[in-house]
Amino acid sequence: MTSFPDGFVWGAATASYQVEGAVSEDGRGPSIWDTFAHTPGKIADGETGDVADDHYHRYAEDIRLLAELGLKAYRFSIAWSRVIPAGSGATNSAGLDFYRRLAETCLENGVTPYATLYHWDLPQPLEDAGGWLVRDAAERFRDFAAITQGALSDVIKHWITLNEPWCSAFLGYGNGEHAPGRTEGADALKAVHHLLLGHGLALQAIKSPENTIGITLNPAPIHAAESGESEADRDAARRIDGLRNRLFLEPLLLGKYPSDVLEDTGMADWFAQYATDLPVISGPLDFLGVNYYCPTTVAAPDGPISDPGKVSTQPGSENVVAVDTGLERTQMGWPIQPSGLRDILKAINDLAPDLPLYVTENGAAYPDEVLSDGTIQDDKRQSYLEQHIEVCRQVTAEGLPLKGYFIWTLMDNFEWAYGFTRRFGLIHVDYPTQQRTLKQSAHWLKNFLTA
């Protein structure tokens, strides 16, 4: 611990639909994930987040466990449909009261709350009106942010507008893997713009000297196959880097969209209509959150790169292929490369020198087994965390403005389209009984943080 700067923030993260349950209690309205999870065939094990970890009722126990691990920050998300059940219009005081109780319980346990305003659970009525493909969603998000921050600003000082807008746009509206399950091709870039506009409008609405506000992205190092010896492979890497990284970082940090991405996707004319939104989108951030899991190596296909008829997260580059480089992988199939975290943090610092950075998610899923003595020996997760925390130590020693590290996730939960088939948690959850058990990685983390 002495090798990290004073004030470095250690935390764990969760998301509302993944943990809360209580989907019909105290006035909460339906979200796109309620609808999606109840659609047959959408979730790997046919489960839903109706109960999940029952965090809505068990939050006090969960926060106590977090604090006992030595963690000093809790990043959670606020369900829009708990606060404004229809997405716009009447506010639900019971929903705001829940998040006040949650934040107050954090503070009572010496834990600083970090609230994410949008972690993918758009109220269903707004999706019915067009969702993130229409501008109104951005304006309604501004209203939701203002209402929520206005009600809770005395107990929550750190705010994240959006979590991983790449996923919201390209998994939700590109290939349909996530809610709302739409396959709109290049029109998914309209969702990108409206999500970023929503961020900018929210930033204007809630920024004040009393709080800090940022956004969380999920950038990834993109490499060309065979060390980039092929011009076609280098172009493939340029295209995917553009969609995954530059399409978000450049408007936020530089006030412009990457022109090559707009040309690749055939969206240049559409974006040209909304150039006046860029000063709003690029409003000054207090910090940038980085969710890091893995790099991607890509190669050009044998045939055309573009196939508009193919359902993909890569509009304009649908046939670019991912390459297996032989790295060890987690249960998610994600290659493990801790050095990629340094690469991403360095690249962002090059774009925006001295902007405070947080690793807002980092973790690994493995098929944990409860042994006969009740323990969970998750050596691979512990090793994963150790390696990535060491990278964090290195980059702070190098002078990069990394201010904190949040583990994904505090406890096993509903892992989106994977249902309950993937476990990322420091804490094991037995879903039928809701019993919580610290895994070996949690015990290691406690020793590390309190040593």
Image (tube, helix red, strand yellow):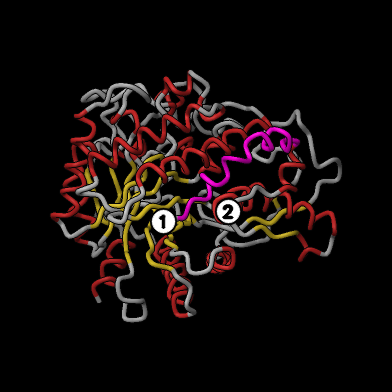
SS assignment at label 1? strand
> Residue 363's x, y, as percent?
43, 57
> Residue 271's x, y, as percent?
67, 37
Q: Amino acid at mark 2?
A: Leu
- The residue beneath circle 2 is 249
- Decide if residue 294 is in sight here: yes
Figure check: 141 above or below 108: above
The quarter holding residue 204 reads top left
Q: Residue at x 76, y 51 (%)?
A: 236
Q: Residue 194: which numbered mark, if any?
A: none
Horizontal relation, residue 309 to residue 296: left or right: right
Q: Residue at x 53, y 41 (%)?
A: 167
Tell me where the magenta segment starts and ends, as one range: 266-284
SS assignment at label 2? helix
Q: Residue 360: which numbered mark, if any?
A: 1
Q: Nearer the viewer, mark 2 or mark 1?
A: 2
Figure check: 82 above or below 340: above
Q: Main secondary structure of the magenta part?
A: helix
Q: Which is nearer the N-term, disc 2 or disc 1?
A: 2
Q: Farthest residue to the left: give it.
A: 108
The quarter holding residue 269 reads top right
Q: Amino acid at mark 1?
A: Thr
> Residue 97's x, y, as percent?
18, 35
